[in-house]
Image (tube, coloured by chain):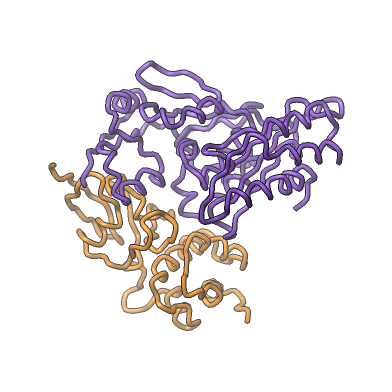
Amino acid sequence: MAVTVKTFTSVSEAAGALSSDRTARYLGGGTLVMRALNEGDVSISTVVRAQDQALTRFDASGPRITLGAGVTFARVLAERDLGFLHAPARSIGGPAVRNMGTVGGNLFAPNPYGDFTVALLALDATVAVQGGFGSRDVGIEEFLQARDRQSGTLVLSISCTRPASTGAFRYRKIARIKPKGGSVITLAAHLPISGGRIAGARIALGSMAPTQIRARAAERALEGQPLDAAAIAAAASAATEGTSPSDNALGSAWYRREIVGVHLRRLLSGQE
Amino acid sequence: MSKIPLQFRHNGRDVAIFVDGGTNLLVALRELIGDMTPKFGCGQGGCGTCSVLIDGELHLSCLTLAESVAGRSIETLDGMKLGPNLHPLQRAFADNFAAQCGYCTPGMLMAAKALLDRNPSPSRDEVIEAISGNICRCTGYEPIINAILAAAGGRVSA
């Protein structure tokens, strides 16, 4: 079925169109919306686009980086200052998908996708959105919890703190098909160290719940501890707490619960 | 619903067509221009057989809104041939038995061209990475990898 495509030059016009039409979906890189159209999703009757250059800008120069929602994964990979995000960007699709898929679109990717968002969740990102109410910043966790109700909202950019050191941020995607493929589980950890102890641990999991989630029990096990074998074992044993994975072709819920602690232990231990 | 006028370059030639809103580039190429070289595989971005180059960058035509290529340059396998001669990549695919059922071949060739256009001497790992979004269900990856390396002038491993 043909849809109406509305293209705007500014994000504010696009946000207005999006918030005033319940059947409208925003088209970023196309990997979600065009797929839905190809599959005959009749709930979409309007496609909204914005050609505002603000969406493809990024600022990676300071301690806090900001990525426009339209920045592609290929662009992230091309930027040396974004090196800490290269592993999550590289773990997504093949080259064509990385040329098309965007940071903003990944926030809406359902399981077994949305791997980049797992990294952003561990980095405690903030999502700048614009809707009929104007623009505001939302914590990524709050954004993800309300993701299904965000259809009238346009994501403008995502910002997060740059990890203090290379070892402070870790990422691992478990997939059956390499180098691409959907996620069995995805893990990311941000482990700032202060005085030899972890201060402000953030662990995020993908494919372990309907949206990407924080592993709060594992974070608590690490908080205030040195990153030693005892703390890692405690975090690994707490990894399933609060999770609610589902079965799909890549793995069963049982299997995901069985392996998440193993992979969290490997991630925290620095094992390949 | 009215048709939308669309102009872009297709294999070096300007084309002008009318599309329905929401039409993907693959449908526009196959059904409106008659370029049958990009294939429909999954329609989900998972198989890569619809791969084309947009302004020299590898994209999936099934996930590209046709309207978004207005004024841009599209390359497909149909434009790869050099006059009466095969492109070196096509010749290498033939010489290295890199096509079995052949359905993945157009996408594989476009992915390979995207790679060699920016990196004329790729390593084997770089070739594998470059075609990682293109599925071959005959599992003929090894001859394909060897063909791409051969076209690049690299060593063809056994």
Using the image as rendered, state which of residue A68 and residue A46 is in the foreground. A46
B138 with respect to A179 (left or right): left
Q: Position of residue A151 (x, y in %)?
A: 37, 30
Quarter of the figure with residue A191: top right
Using the image as rendered, state which of residue B52 and residue B72 is in the foreground. B52
Instruction: Establish if B16 lies above or below B148.
Output: above
Using the image as rendered, state which of residue A170 and residue A64 is in the foreground. A170
Q: Residue at left 39%, top 39%?
A: A28
Quarter of the figure with residue B58: bottom left
Which residue appears farthest toward the left when viewing the image? B2
Q: Position of residue A256 (x, y in %)?
A: 63, 49
The orange one among the chains is B
Q: Residue at left 44%, top 78%?
A: B99
Which residue appears farthest toward the front when viewing the image? A254
B82 with respect to B120 (left or right): left
Instruction: Establish if A18 lies above or below B18.
Output: above
Quarter of the figure with residue B48: bottom left
Using the image as rendered, state which of residue B111 and residue B40 is in the foreground. B40
Q: Position of residue B14 (x, y in %)?
A: 23, 56
Please tell me how many numbered marks the rendered image carries: 0
B73 with respect to B96 (left or right): left
Q: Position of residue A92 (x, y in %)?
A: 54, 49
Chain A: drawing colour: purple
Q: Residue at left 75%, top 28%?
A: A220
